[in-house]
Structure formats: C-alpha cells, structure tokens
Image: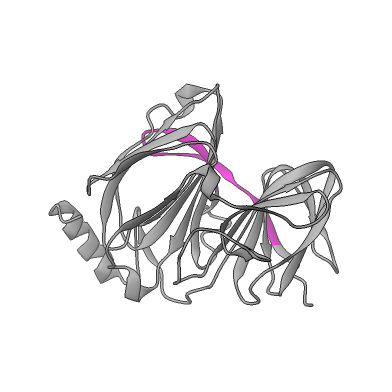
Amino acid sequence: MPFREVIWTGRGVATQDGAGVKLTRIIGQPDLPDLDPFLLLDEFSSDDPKAYVAGFPDHPHRGFETVTYMLAGRMRHQDSKGNQGLLQAGSVQWMTAGRGIVHSEMPEQERGLLRGFQLWINLPGREKMRPPRYQEFAPELIPSAAIGAGVGAKIVAGEIGATRGPVEAAATQPIYFDLAFEAEAGADIPLPQDHAAFVYVYEGDLHIGQAAPRRLERGDLGVLSSGAAVRLTAGGAGARALLVGGRPLGEPIVRYGPFVMNTREEIRQAMADFQAGKF
C-alpha cells in the first residue's frame, strides 16, 4: 500500500474577518493561498467575547461551498432565502453557495468558550451557478468510528470502513474526519489515491508518514503527497486533528473576496448581480 508523506508544513497567520472577528487563517494565506479544491481554512478559538462578538454580518458568496464545524460555543445564522438556524457544539453546516446567497453568521459563547473551523471548497465551473442549498447536521447525526486501539474519528464526509459521513458533495467527493488519539496511539487511514489532502493538528502532536515521519505540533498543517493511506501516530499527550481531502478540480481560479469563479468576466457579473439585488 503506497503511504502518503508530508510534503509541506506551515502554520496559520493571525487575521480578522467579518466585523473584526479574530481568527487564524491556515489555508488562504500568503504561504498557502489554496490547495485545490480547498480555498480557505480558518480556525476561530477564544474565551474573550470581544474577539468575536461582532460576528459576520450580512455578506455574499458565489461559486463555492463553506463548511462550518463547531467544537465549542454556538453559531447563529440566517440568509437572504429565509433560512435560519443555530449551530451548536459538534454540529456541521455544509453550505453550497452556488449562484449566490447573502447570509450572516453570529458567534455565541457557551460556558465561556467558542471554537471551530470554517473550510471553503471550490465548485467546478459547471456547478457554480447551481441553486444554493444547505446540509446541516446536529452532533448526533455525525457518526463515529474506532479506527484502531485508542484512535477514534468523527466522520463528517467520506467513509472509514462501513461508517459513512452524512455530507453529500459529488463534485469533489470530500473526506472530512475529526480524529482523536490517546497517548502514543496510531492508525493507518485509507484515502482516495489522488485526492489532495492535509492534516491540521489542533491539540497535542502527531507523527505523520511511514518512510519519513514528520512531527506536527498544535497549529501545524501538513500537506500530504498522493497515496492510498496515511499513517498517523500521536505523541505522549495524545492528539486531535482534522484530516481533510478532496478531488482536485484543475480549473482556473479567479477570486474577489467572497466570489470564486473561473474568469474575470464571471467575477464582474457576480459583482453586478450582487449590486442589483439578485442574490
């Protein structure tokens, strides 16, 4: 079995988004502007309400998908189509912006904590103008699987053995696993051979790879080579990590803020449609 190795490592950069929300940008920053099909990965984590209380007021999206995964706290959302809801700890929202939507996301502290991730995934040109849709899953709808002694996974998308995540996203066939390792526990996790994939360690540390294992600490992202599986082994304090992969699209990317299209003309049209109130 060809194992994947770490071919690039880096750390996120502190930034602000929305109405001044403080976060760490891991993908979408100068050292890693994208990783086809992934456009952005943000981690938000704070016990200080001033860091996020203003939230993300109304803003548009077109041409891609957003994935919000809450570890702690809540996220209240509503949009221009009349949808609204409240994401709680352990919930996932997979929003396909498609041809355009305007929405707001307002964080709420719970027991003094707010923590989670947002991932942006590109859509192929043929699907960028599809109708918007949501896939939203409460914690009890995210299945878990044991993948070795002392290793467990919450499966948002993709599958491990006979356990499959609830998200459907045919364009990029994503995997999205939240992994938990006890001290010095390890596992070999199968992956689609040609998917782009990365590991982001958000607690503890992990050794990644078989032939030349690399140690990643909290806050490190490792981009993986191609291969059918990845070997992960935790250090003495255990670890928590995201393992995410998707089918590359191999298409031109033209970005302008919350619009991601294939050509400059499509970006100009997105701006015109938004200004005309067509989202």
Determine whether, in the image, residue 22 is placed left or right of residue 182.
Answer: left
Tell me, yes or no, if residue 135 can be seen here. yes
Query: Magenta segment, which residues?
Result: 8-25
Q: In which image quadrant can residue 233 be found? A: bottom right
Q: Main secondary structure of the magenta part?
A: strand
Q: Position of residue 117 (x, y in %)?
A: 53, 45
State the residue lying farthest toward the left.
276
In the image, residue 9 lies in the stretch drawn in magenta = yes
Picture mark count = 0
Determine whether, in the image, residue 22 is placed left or right of residue 129.
Answer: right
- Tell me what residue is drawn at x 55 percent, y 59 percent: 165
Determine whether, in the image, residue 274 is placed left or right of residue 238.
Answer: left
- Tell me what residue is drawn at x 51 percent, y 58 percent: 166
**Between 35 and 100, which is closer to the camera in this rendering?**
100
- Tell me what residue is drawn at x 54 percent, y 44 percent: 140
Image quadrant holding the C terminus, namely bottom left
Task: Identify whether 3 is placed above or below 114.
Answer: below
**Between 232 and 182, which is closer to the camera in this rendering?**
182
Task: Identify whether 91 is placed above or below 55.
Answer: below
Q: Position of residue 42 (x, y in %)?
A: 52, 46
Image quadrant holding the N terminus, namely bottom right
- Tell me what residue is drawn at x 80 percent, y 59 percent: 187
Tell me, yes or no, if residue 42 can be seen here. no
Q: Position of residue 126 (x, y in %)?
A: 33, 76
**Between 260 and 179, which is closer to the camera in this rendering?**
179
Q: Position of residue 178 (x, y in %)?
A: 63, 50
Display colour scheme: one colour
**Between 189 and 40, which is closer to the camera in this rendering?**
189
In the image, residue 248 lies in the stretch drawn in magenta = no
